[in-house]
Image (cartoon, rainbow, N blue to C red):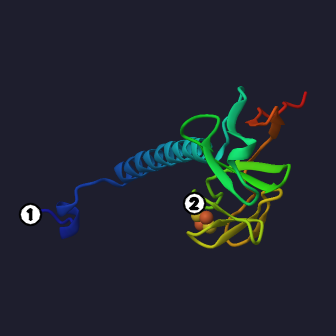
Amino acid sequence: MSDQPHWKTNFPVRQSEEHEVSRRQFCQFACGSAAAFGAGWIVKQKLFSAPVATEPKLVARLGEIEIGGSRLFQYPTADHPCILVRLGESEFAAYSQSCTHLMCPVHYRHETRQLVCPCHEGFFSAEDGRVLAGPPPRALPRYPVEVRNGEIWIVPKVQSV
Ligand code: FES
């Protein structure tokens, strides 16, 4: 019978091997963390970065939206819901409809000239998209609007050089 303690016969791992296991586990943890961080960054870019638009889009004709009204559309792709609001006779604004908090769709409330997110009571100014109240961390992405010959167009943002 050996004079080793009982636990050593049950766990026959030498001390130098324990360090090998720890190093391996550390590497697995580091690689796993890096992969998770990379995947998270890609998801964030996909969800929260507005894609670059290159083509103008006809959203409505002037007579189709009354003052205080709104129209939903997709821009620049079918995966990006947006909202056009008519603030006044010749005053329009267009925004991404996805709340910057957790992506719930915002709705226009003309009485207060606000875009409202019902999920967690986020409020945005319909005049410039800035956050007025609630948890949203940043303004709604805004798209330039042009009225041409009685038609309301969303136009690509001009890239600064
Ligand atoms: Fe809009 Fe939370 S998703 S406030």
Whether residue 10 sits left or right of residue 36 in the image: it is: left
8 relative to 147, above or below: below
All told, the count of numbered labels is: 2
Viewer-side residue, 130 vs 13: 130
145 relative to 66, above or below: above
Whether residue 23 sits left or right of residue 62 in the image: it is: left
The numbered mark at residue 42 is none
Mark 1 crowdedness (10 Å alpha carbons): few <14, some 14-19, many ≥20: few
Query: What residue is shown at x 61% (from left), y 53% (from top)?
Result: 98
Dividing the image into 4 quarters, which one contains the C terminus?
Answer: top right
Viewer-side residue, 124 vs 61: 61
Q: Secondary structure at mark 2?
A: loop
Q: Is residue 52 visible?
A: no
What type is the residue that disc 2 sits on?
Leu
Whether residue 125 sits left or right of residue 30 in the image: it is: right
**Marked residue nearer the N-terminal end (1 or 2):** 1
Residue 93 percent coordinates (x, y): 78, 50
> Could you give the CA–CA distance between mark 1 and mark 2, rounded to whole angstroms?
66 Å
Q: Is disc 2's CB within 8 Å of ligand 1? A: yes
What type is the residue that disc 1 sits on?
Met
Q: Residue furthest front?
A: 63
Q: Give ligand 1's quarter of the image.
A: bottom right
Residue 54 percent coordinates (x, y): 72, 26
Residue 65 percent coordinates (x, y): 70, 50
Disc 1 to disc 2: CB gap under 8 Å: no
Q: Is residue 116 visible?
A: yes
Q: Which residue is mark 1?
A: 1
Query: What residue is shown at x 77% (from left), y 60% (from top)?
Result: 126
Mark 2 crowdedness (10 Å alpha carbons): few <14, some 14-19, many ≥20: some
Q: Which residue is mark 2?
A: 102
